[in-house]
Amino acid sequence: AVPTSARAQSSGGQASLSAGMARTTAMIPLAQLRVIKTRPVKERPTRRKVGWGSGEHMTYRVSLAGIWGGRAAISVGKVKGKGNRASLRIRGMGETVPFISAISHMREDLITAVRLKDLRPLSQVADRKAPNKDRLLKTSFGADLKQTLTFQGKTHHHTRRVMDQGALHDPITALFSLRAVKFRKGETFSMRVVNGTSLMLVEASVVGRKRIFIDGKAHNTWHVEGTGRKIRDDGTPWPNKAPRHLAIWFSADRARVPVRVEGDTRFGKIVAL
């Protein structure tokens, strides 16, 4: 059954974003969340204002082009290491619901290793299962962006020199960075996000506080809205690539749970509740 509540407790979480890092949001398909069994994070940055906790498990329901045909989940692992070496893994999973899967089953499993001191991705493994389109993409975030793509039995290795490499995020770390900051109306965010093999420039702003209703239940939220544009590794925009709209409503509490998400994709509009 799909949960209808969106409740969160924050018992750990991350600090405000480090110097030199623009505050931003990310393009990631999400839906209404239910957070359970939150445990304290051992690392407690002194500047933390809001945040999330190790041990969270969140479930979603997703529609694409008006059809409620997907479900997903995000789980936050345990903290490993201490000090500057502290890290954890965040896992995101998504798949089609049974009545869609009877026609065509699709599943994607995304695991990101996150460095806690600045919420930067260390590595990512994205495993997508789809009819005749299985894909495995491994990404390493370091001095260079290294990616290994296995598609239809063929493996390709790429080393990319991305402008301002140290400021990159993936969709998961971008989302969780937003959950770790204190919103102010009118504040703007800008970030470059590696989404698969694409590099996106995401620009957004805090619209303000808003009370929304989901399945008849009221939620006090912060409304963040913006666009995502595909760019080259040198930071210049791809020609003839229109920006795509995105919006996220975060719970107006310390946990910053995304309770509603909207975004444009090439297949239509995603609405997550």
Image (cartoon, rainbow, N blue to C red):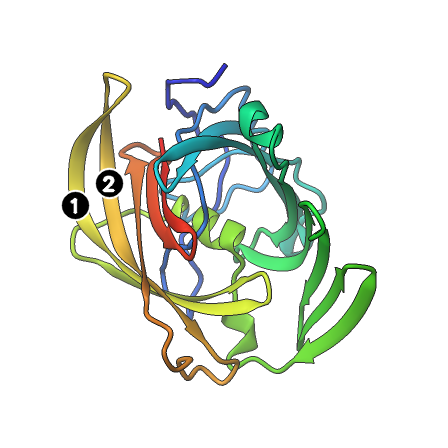
Q: Say whether residue 253 is left or right of residue 195.
A: left
Q: Say whether residue 149 is left or right of residue 200.
A: right
Instruction: Give the vertical position of 135 relative to 261 (above or below).
Output: below
Q: Which mark is residue 106?
A: none
Name the foreground residue: 191 vs 38.
191
Label 2 packing within 10 angstroms: few (<14), some (14-19), many (20+):
many
Q: Where residue 52 sits: x, y (%)?
A: 47, 36
**SS of the residue under disc 2:** strand
Disc 1 residue type? Gly
**Residue shown at 61%/82% (left/top)?**
161
**Residue shown at 26%/34% (left/top)?**
252
Using the numbered discs, state the Cα–Cα distance from disc 1 to disc 2 in whole angstroms: 6 Å
Residue 204: quadrant of the picture: bottom left
Residue 17 visible (yes or no): yes
Give the labeled residue for mark 1.
Answer: 208
Give the labeled residue for mark 2.
Answer: 222
**Residue shown at 70%/68% (left/top)?**
147
Q: Say whether residue 183 is left or right of residue 208.
A: right
Residue 130: quadrant of the picture: top right
**Residue shown at 52%/33% (left/top)?**
53
Residue 63: quadrant of the picture: top left
**SS of the residue under disc 1:** strand
Q: Where residue 142 sits: x, y (%)?
A: 67, 71
Q: How many marks?
A: 2
Name the foreground residue: 209 vs 273.
273
State yes or no: discs 1 and 2 in contact (Cβ < 8 Å).
Answer: yes
Q: Earlier in the sequence, mark 1 or mark 2?
A: 1
